[in-house]
Amino acid sequence: MLRLTALASGRGSNVAAIADAVARGDLDATLGLVVSNNSSAGVLSYAQTHGIPCAHISGKTHADEGAALLEALSAANTDVLVLAGYMKKLDPRVVSAYEGRAVNIHPGPLPDFGGRGMFGEHVHAAVLEAGRTQSGPTVHRVTAEYDEGATLGFRPVPVLPGDTPRSLGERVLAAEHDLYWRVLDEVFVRPSRSS
Ligand code: GAR
């Protein structure tokens, strides 16, 4: 069975949505490890209370953070690396070891609203500022550059009159939760069944 490792820096609602899809039987995979670079991240508490193995790996815990991450990923027999609000550039050794097997979710359309500094509410504020009538999360492959890998899935979300970055962000987040596990299923689980 496909073994997923999630990397997250914050509250972990996307990790929870993926774990829920696994628990419901909608995603035929195992969430074998959650790694955070932030010791106080909600995602670590979530993993602990749900019995998912987890680790805090950062420059504070390990002199060579990239090597420690690689070791943990390999020890967990990671097939697919799932970035979910991981607010840190991935070490190039990790990018190359998981080339074609690492994905990220971004809370806006790419490439227009991606790149350095484009995360969380900054993305929603930029979409509103640009006067767009549609936003929506994008799931894409991870490459060495921020938000540049091929798009694997996008879910349109309307921008409504009177939206604030927060209200738009809430609507986009709900779409993220329904999109991410479906893309993992389509891209990694189904093809491995038919081969
Ligand atoms: C999500 O909205 C995700 O798209 C975004 O961080 C949030 C994490 O929320 N990621 C980025 O902005 C990456 N550029 P979560 O911790 O509740 O899953």
Image (tube, helix red, strand yellow):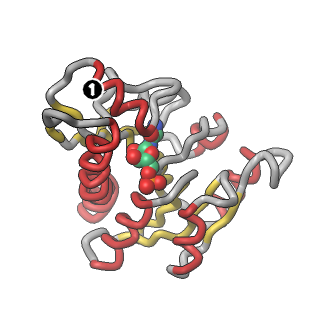
The vertical placement of 192 against 50, above or below, is above
Identify the residue under disc 1. 128
In the rendering, at what x and y percent does residue 155 appear? 20, 43
Q: Is residue 85 left or right of residue 155?
A: right
**In the image, what residue occupies the spot 32% across and 28% down?**
110
Residue 176 percent location from the top left of the image = 30, 51
In the image: residue 148, left or right of residue 163: right
Left or right: 55, with 4 as reference point: right
Q: Toward which corner of the image does residue 191 lie, by quadrant?
A: bottom left
Answer whether residue 195 is visible to the viewer in this image: no
Q: Residue 136: where, in percent of width, then height?
A: 24, 39
Q: Mark 1: which secondary structure?
A: helix
* Residue 77 pos. (x, y %): 58, 65
Residue 181 visible at all: yes
Does residue 42 sit above or below 138 in this rendering?
A: below
Residue drawn at point x = 47 percent, y = 66 percent: 3
Seen from the viewer's position, the closer of residues 171 and 52 is 171
In this view, which residue lies farthest toward the front? 162
Near-viewer residue (110 or 76): 110
Amino acid at pointer 1 = Leu
